[in-house]
């Protein structure tokens, strides 16, 4: 018979930093070996920060290092788990498919049906939406904001079919999933009906952009980072490095049936003249080989001349793909814009 006394685990959650723990099976308690953002030598691992029977309590906000100085870095695990709530809900989409929605908020600061919120999505290439720990979110959560992650079809899911059901002629499933998740947040009182913003980057920016065309009043503001919005023309440009790959993901405009499918959801081709769109912050990079800046600019530029729209395009001259809006300065710009509009 195999007897296990100790287990080493890596804990990865939305509301705490990645943490390596040693779990004592016999005592039903664990001690922290390492936590992201902390120096291991400063951790007091002689006693667990939290135990199943709460026999070990530590109410201090900080750890006391060997020198006696307080470490005011990342809050302790039990404090974060008590301070923040992370829920996973299943949202019924337009065709009855259940879409995972992860919702993060503060126990103390959140107010039902009154709090502002942000909905984030990607839904492309079978990639799982990044919901890992991010200290940048804490200041917003502590101010009552709700941050939600929609794992729409087209992204990573339980199996390969989740990706395929959001590609090609089925790409609209991704957009509908995003819309239904947004309505769920408002209908269930997680956020105020008129205080919801959306964020999408690269191929994921197609979600809020297409959703705004279909339902202009759904979001109060939107952040589009190096957005993929001129879908039809981009997929027709054989000079771009991802064109052939994107034909598999979004469809081939050289095939008539797929051309009509792309035309049905492409944000640039579906801008309406008779509505007022939410405010937008659009970012682009002069050195982005995947999303040419002139394709990114076309969507807001045609909009500004035809409809009532508040928008701002920000170029990051020294940035390449994958590095846009990193760092406190760029994050502060995003947060300031959303806070102003909501």
Image: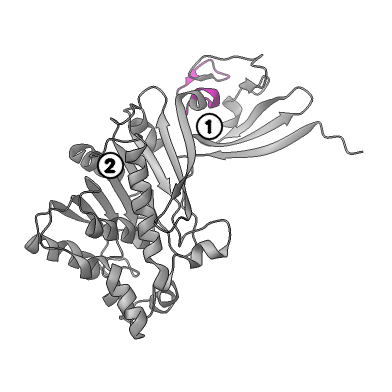
Q: Is residue 112 magenta?
A: no
**Contact check, label 1 and label 2, Cβ < 8 Å:** no
Query: Where is residue 238, by image quadrant?
Result: bottom left
The quadrant of the rendering that contains the C terminus is top left
Residue behind mark 1:
38
Which span is picked out in magenta?
A: 65-79
Give percent across and percent down for residue 104.
Answer: 43, 36
- Using residue 305 as the reference point, say whether residue 22 is left or right of it: right
Give percent across and percent down for residue 73.
Answer: 46, 27
Q: Main secondary structure of the magenta part?
A: loop
Give percent across and percent down for residue 256.
Answer: 33, 85
Disc number at residue 196? Answer: 2
Q: Nearer the viewer, residue 12 or 275?
A: 275
Q: Is residue 66 magenta?
A: yes
Residue at x 13% of width, y 62% of height = 303
Furthest toward the right, the residue is 1
Cα separation between marks 1 and 2: 34 Å
Query: Where is residue 177, by image quadrant?
Result: bottom left
Q: Earlier in the sequence, mark 1 or mark 2?
A: 1
Rendered position, 265 above or below 217 = below
Disc number at residue 311? Answer: none
Q: Nearer the viewer, residue 3 or 163?
A: 163
The quadrant of the rendering that contains the N terminus is top right
| Within-10-Å neighbours for mark 1: few <14, some 14–19, many 20+ | some
- Residue 214 visible in the current orientation: yes
Residue at x 21% of width, y 45% of height = 220
Rendered position, 295 above or below 176 = below
- What kind of colouring is applied to the model shown? one colour
């Amino acid at each position: 018979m195999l007897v296990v006394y100790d287990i080493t685990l890596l804990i990865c959650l939305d509301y705490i930093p990645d943490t390596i723990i040693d779990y004592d099976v016999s005592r039903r308690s664990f001690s922290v070996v390492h936590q992201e953002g902390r120096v291991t030598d400063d951790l007091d691992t002689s006693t667990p920060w939290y135990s199943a029977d709460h026999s070990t309590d530590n109410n201090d906000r900080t750890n006391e290092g060997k020198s006696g100085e307080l470490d005011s870095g990342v809050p302790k695990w039990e404090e974060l788990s008590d301070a923040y709530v992370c829920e996973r809900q299943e949202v019924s989409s337009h065709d009855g498919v259940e879409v995972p929605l992860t919702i993060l908020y503060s126990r103390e600061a959140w107010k039902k049906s009154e709090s502002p919120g942000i909905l984030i999505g990607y839904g492309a290439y079978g990639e799982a939406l990044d919901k890992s720990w991010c200290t940048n979110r804490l200041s917003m959560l502590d101010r009552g904001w709700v941050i939600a992650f929609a794992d729409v079809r087209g992204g990573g899911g339980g199996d390969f079919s989740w990706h395929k059901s959001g590609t090609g002629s089925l790409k609209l499933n991704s957009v509908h999933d995003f819309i239904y998740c947004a309505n769920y947040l408002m209908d269930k009182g997680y956020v105020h009906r008129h205080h919801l913003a959306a964020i999408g980057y690269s191929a994921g920016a197609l979600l809020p952009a297409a959703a705004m065309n279909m339902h202009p009043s759904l979001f109060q503001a939107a952040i589009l980072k190096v957005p993929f919005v001129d879908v039809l023309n981009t997929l027709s440009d054989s000079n771009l490095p991802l064109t052939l790959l994107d034909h598999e993901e979004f469809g081939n405009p050289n095939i008539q049936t797929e051309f009509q499918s792309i035309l049905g959801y492409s944000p640039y081709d579906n801008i309406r003249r008779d509505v007022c769109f939410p405010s937008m912050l659009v970012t682009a990079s002069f050195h982005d080989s995947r999303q040419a800046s002139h394709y990114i600019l076309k969507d807001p530029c045609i909009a500004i001349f035809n409809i009532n729209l508040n928008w701002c395009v920000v170029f990051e001259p020294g940035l390449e793909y994958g590095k846009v809006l990193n760092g406190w300065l760029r994050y502060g710009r995003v947060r300031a814009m959303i806070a102003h509009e909501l």
